[in-house]
């Protein structure tokens, strides 16, 4: 199994020194650089660049600049997707967003994680677990979502939350660590 296959399988992989993965990240970061330097008024070019960066997009979406990601092709966004300024998605594994997802400024989605044992971590090994976000989800500003988390449909995640565990559908959740404080519907 090669390093990319290990990465997408959630196994330890060489995320720092593998040349194939480094080249993929550099190509994606070059596209992000171009996207972030494109005039906000040039919506046609911005949309074309995001479609090059991301794995799957629908028709109606807007990602405000700046936007950063590692690979891009592991990210899928649904219809009517909006992300405010300074979205960061570390996507060595899949990050899937449903329809009608709205993301406040300075939010981050991290599929990458690192071993707790320093000897393993210092070898450049890491793992990546997928993140899944359902439909009709709203994230307040400065939210961080960690590896392996799923967030159900119709959720609101309060500003400043650090989401470490799954959030069930129809929940309002806040805090660090993020916890459900109320069910809706």
Image (tube, rainbow, N blue to C red):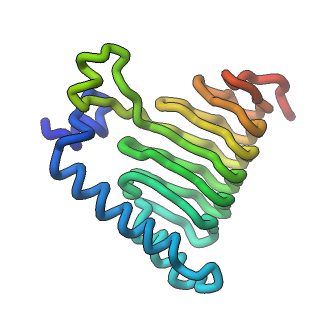
Toward the viewer: 4 or 161? 161
Q: Residue furthest top?
A: 117
Please give left or right for residue 170 compared with residue 132 in the image.
Answer: right
Q: Picture quarter containing residue 158?
A: top right
Residue drawn at (73%, 22%) of the image:
179
Q: Quadrant of the C terminus?
A: top right
Measuring from the top left, give residue 75's x and y in whole percent. Answer: 45, 53
Please give left or right for residue 87 compared with residue 130 in the image.
Answer: right
Residue drawn at (44%, 37%) of the image:
111
Q: Residue furthest left?
A: 1
Q: Quadrant of the N terminus?
A: top left
Measuring from the top left, give residue 171's x and y in whole percent. Answer: 77, 31
**Exactly how many numbered labels are in the figure?**
0
Rendered position, 163 above or below 135: above
Toward the viewer: 132 or 113? 113
Rendered position, 125 above or below 44: above
Q: Picture quarter containing residue 123?
A: top left
Residue drawn at (54%, 42%) of the image:
109
Residue drawn at (59%, 23%) of the image:
165
Measuring from the top left, give residue 138's x and y in whole percent. Answer: 74, 46
Rendered position, 185 above or below 68: above
Please give left or right for residue 89 compared with residue 161 in the image.
Answer: left
Measuring from the top left, give residue 139's x and y in whole percent. Answer: 71, 44
């Amino acid at each position: 199994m090669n390093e990319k296959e290990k990465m997408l399988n959630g196994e330890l992989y060489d995320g720092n020194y593998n040349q194939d993965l480094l080249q993929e990240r550099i190509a994606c970061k070059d596209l992000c650089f171009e996207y972030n330097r494109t005039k906000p008024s040039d919506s046609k070019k911005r949309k074309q660049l995001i479609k090059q960066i991301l794995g799957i997009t629908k028709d109606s979406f807007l990602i405000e600049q700046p936007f950063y990601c590692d690979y891009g092709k592991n990210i899928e966004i649904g219809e009517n997707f909006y992300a405010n300024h300074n979205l960061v998605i570390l996507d060595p594994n899949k990050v899937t967003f449903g329809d009608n997802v709205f993301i406040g400024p300075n939010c981050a989605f991290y599929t990458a994680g690192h071993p707790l044992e320093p000897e393993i971590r210092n070898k450049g090994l890491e793992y990546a677990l997928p993140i899944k976000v359902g439909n009709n989800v709203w994230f307040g500003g400065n939210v961080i979502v960690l590896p392996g988390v799923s967030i159900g449909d119709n959720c609101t995640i309060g500003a400043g939350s650090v989401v470490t565990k799954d959030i069930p559908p129809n929940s309002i959740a806040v805090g660090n660590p993020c916890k459900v404080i109320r069910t809706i519907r």
